[in-house]
Amino acid sequence: MIPEKLLNLVVLALLLAVPYWASLNDAPFTITLATRATIFALAAVGLNIALGMGGMVSLGHALFFGIGGYTMGILAFHAQSFTPLIDGPMVIEGTKSMPVIWAVAMGVSALAALVIGALSLRTAGVYFIMITLAFGQMLFFFTISWSSYGGEDGLSIFLRNEFPGLDTLVPFNFFALCYGLLVLVILFNARFARSPFGLALNAARQSPDRVRAVGLNPQRLKLVAFVISGTITGLAGALFADLNRFVSPTMFSWQTSGEIMVFVILGGVARLCGPVVGAVAFVMLEHFLGGLSEFWHIYLGLLLLLIVLFARGGLVGLVARRGAAHD
Amino acid sequence: MSTILIIEQVLNGLQFGVMLFLMAAGLTLIFGVMGLINLAHGSLYMIGAFVAAAVAGLTGSFLLAIAAAMAAAAVAGVLVEMLVIRRLYAADHLDQVLATFALILIFSEGTRWVFGSFPLFLDIPSEISGPVTLPGGIEYPLYRLVLIGIGLAVAATLGWLITKTRIGIRIRAGENDREMIAALGVDISKLYTAIFALGAALAGLAGALVGAIQSVQVGMGEPVLILAFVVIVIGGIGSIKGALIGSILVGLTDTLGGIFLPELFKLFMAPAAAQSAGASLASMAIYILMGAVLIWRPTGLFGARAA
């Protein structure tokens, strides 16, 4: 057993070192895999705030992932086809600038999380799971029937979007951007968990009645956490769309929600770097088992079943002891 | 928009609704009594459809296919309950979601492994395949009428089972207080397995019946499962009556919305825009219905408790 802090550092260092080595040795596919894992990790870090800290079992986080993806898709689509996004008295153009796309993706995700969170948090427990799942499915079917933006076929973006002062077409540069965002969000998350708000949220998960008794509104705490969670997952969605240069309704599918949740559980719920470990492990399983057998989901299913039944702390729980900073 | 079209669509909605009821009834019983959220219920539906298609292909008998589908789904349900689900009753919902998500992966890929990726087809037997003429000169497929009949018959039987029989009393007692009925000498573990088998058999029945009007393929269960969740949220968890009314509401909203919303939009929009806006809104109609019910009654129409 090693301290969790040390493990976190090792994991993050490895996640940076492997693609760097790959960029020196001209192995772009490895960089793509690492970028994929990094983006999944970011989405899962987002979900972990709702799931691990807030105790909200959201099975609809694909919704924010998809909203982020479609924000990127729609803005870049208008920029590449030179058509205005909104015509009329006020003209809004599309854009290929990553920072603008990220900001819009996060804003739209936050707004969606506010509405959906406010509705879903009227309920609790198993209702909450079913409702978040249903809202995800709602947008899935909406994008399928939304013919202006490709409907079922999705949208292709020909060139990766631009970041000021960086050639994003170089695989390692794009990885570095995603990695930088992931580290920023993890640092934010670490501070957030220790902030008065984070502590109150933790308490709201464990004992809503006591939180209410000291004069805080647990539902409001959870709603704010849900919005933060959705915003981060939305940002990951925008990056994922940029990695593939393609968005489709699949981003909204219930399987995507399930997978984001699997990243969190595989790594370890409410662990700072649990989602990172989970996402990396998932991408590696997908790559290696997928190469061995077409039916690798069976093995993934069995592994998941074993973890749920026998290893409650996930992979991080197997090797690291809990740090004092966590509950 | 003719009356005949409207009646046809209402019947289609009803047929869709009662098939959803077969799924939702099992889910709501399993949740109501065992407190378990079972995502793998859609897999049992898929197993029913595949077994029905395979047995019908081998024997040519539709009735035998239906019976085999129910039996196979029930056996799969009992196996899953005894091997996995039993360990999850005391666990929190997150573990239940994950374990049953894992079961979906195993069942879906296992089915793909056994039957391949191509869809199978299940033929409607010739005796009930043609159209019938309803009063008023409406031609309607007999098979869909049979489905409505079967669905309503199952609903009536379940209602009778829950309210009038000894096992129904135990089920209701189990919903209210598990420890107490265990203390009164009811073998709670057998009761759970029986309820799980009943829910699984109903899902298998639904899969087999719907398999005859859709293609039978891997992944067919989950969209139905999610709709069944919407039904349960609307109807209230644990309530069979809520599941029936919720199913029919969802069935009618989905079917009628897809037909009438584009028509409605054409009254004040250009036809092409109306078609696309109407179709988009129709695809979201049942979720909007769910949201509206939640604002009005957070525990569903007939739900007594928030769980």
Image: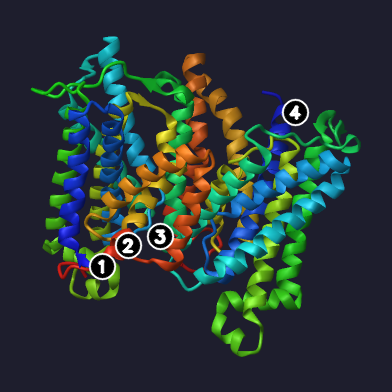
Q: Check disc 4 and report the residue beneath it.
A: B4
Residue at figure coordinates x 26%, y 67% from the top left: A204
Q: Is residue A238 visible?
A: no
The type of residue carrying mark 3 is Thr
Tell which tag, 1 or 2, sits nearer the viewer.
Answer: 2
Q: Are marks 2 and 3 on the same chain?
A: yes
Q: Check disc 2 and report the residue beneath it.
A: A55
Q: Are marks 4 and 2 on the same chain?
A: no
Which quadrant would residue B194 be assigned to in this image?
Answer: bottom right
The type of residue carrying mark 1 is Ala
Residue at figure coordinates x 77%, y 45% from the top left: B52
Q: Check disc 1 and report the residue beneath it.
A: A204
State the separation of the CA atoms marked 1 and 2: 9 Å
- Left or right of residue A174, residue B172 in this image: right
Identify the subunit bearing mark 3. A
- Residue B212 lies, in percent from the top left, at 76, 38
The type of residue carrying mark 2 is Gly
Q: Quadrant of the N terminus of chain A?
A: bottom left
Residue at figure coordinates x 46%, y 39% from the top left: A290
State the separation of the CA atoms marked 3 and 4: 41 Å
Q: Regarding mark 2 in the picture, which secondary structure is present there?
A: loop
Tell which tag, 4 or 2, sits nearer the viewer.
Answer: 2
The type of residue carrying mark 4 is Ile
Q: Residues within 10 Å of mark 2 (few under 14, many from 20)?
A: many
